[in-house]
Image (cartoon, grey):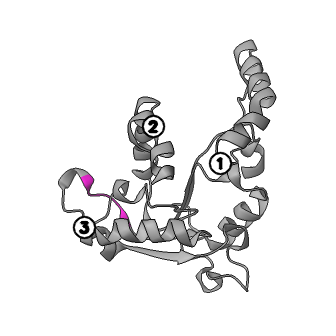
Amino acid sequence: AAYDRLDGGAPAAFLGFEALRSRLLARARGRVLELAVGTGLNLPLYHFTDGVEPSKRGSVDSVLGVDISQGMLAQAQTRLERDPFLAVHVSLVRADVTQLGQDSSALAASRGTFDTILDTYSLCVIDDVGAVLDGARRLIAERESSRLLLLEHVAADGSAPPARALRFYQDASAPLVRRLAKGCAWNQRLVDAVR
């Protein structure tokens, strides 16, 4: 509930987070793996192929949500239990996203099977982002239509004075933000890691 108040609700809507999430999830296709699914905040935003509402029909067949926290998964499961349509399309698994696709992981048999891998606002709290991205590479299908969708806190990019000033501010305030915002490193250089 506290997570949903921090990353969802009125403050998030005011800051445009809800709209960003909705636009990102509208790009998901096929079989989706959602990394660090948390409380399932994104789940109602998916556009399934057999969506009941015409405005919510899309190209998602199914979603597998993974998270390391049993408490977060329990909240996501409660969300599914309140929405029978979602419960048919979404499965939840406890897994460490830094171990994805390794032989010992919960998803070892899923190599190359996901059309979309999605993450929203969790890589900033994971120390080994490289391991997560390596796991995503192992699990995503090798098709031109496959996609890795990320919505993350990142360092401002660019050499123009406003970008440099914002990046300086992000770097200077990062230790305080990390302590106050569930460990978020909002100045990470994620673009370089993804390339």
- The residue lying furthest to the left in this view is 53
Label number found at residue 182: 1
Find the distance from the CA under tag 2 to the CA under tag 1. Answer: 16 Å
Instruction: Tell me whether circle 2 and circle 1 mark residues in contact (CB < 8 Å).
Output: no
Give the magenta part as a residue range.
56-60
24 or 39: which is nearer to us? Answer: 39
Q: Magenta part mainly helix, strand or loop? A: loop
Amino acid identity at mark 3: Asp
Classify the position of the N terminus by image quarter: bottom left
Residue hosting label 3: 50
Nearer to us of marks 2 and 3 is: 2
Give the amino acid at mark 2.
Answer: Ala
Query: What residue occupies the far top of the structure in this picture?
Result: 161
| Residue at screen point 59% across, 48% down | 121
The answer to which of 143 and 134 lies nearer the viewer is 134
Q: Secondary structure at mark 1?
A: loop
What residue did someone put label 2 on?
12
Q: Is residue 173 visible?
A: yes
CA–CA distance in space, label 1 to label 3: 36 Å
Instruction: Measuring from the top left, give residue 5's x and y in whole percent.
Output: 45, 45
Say what secondary structure mark 2 lies in.
helix
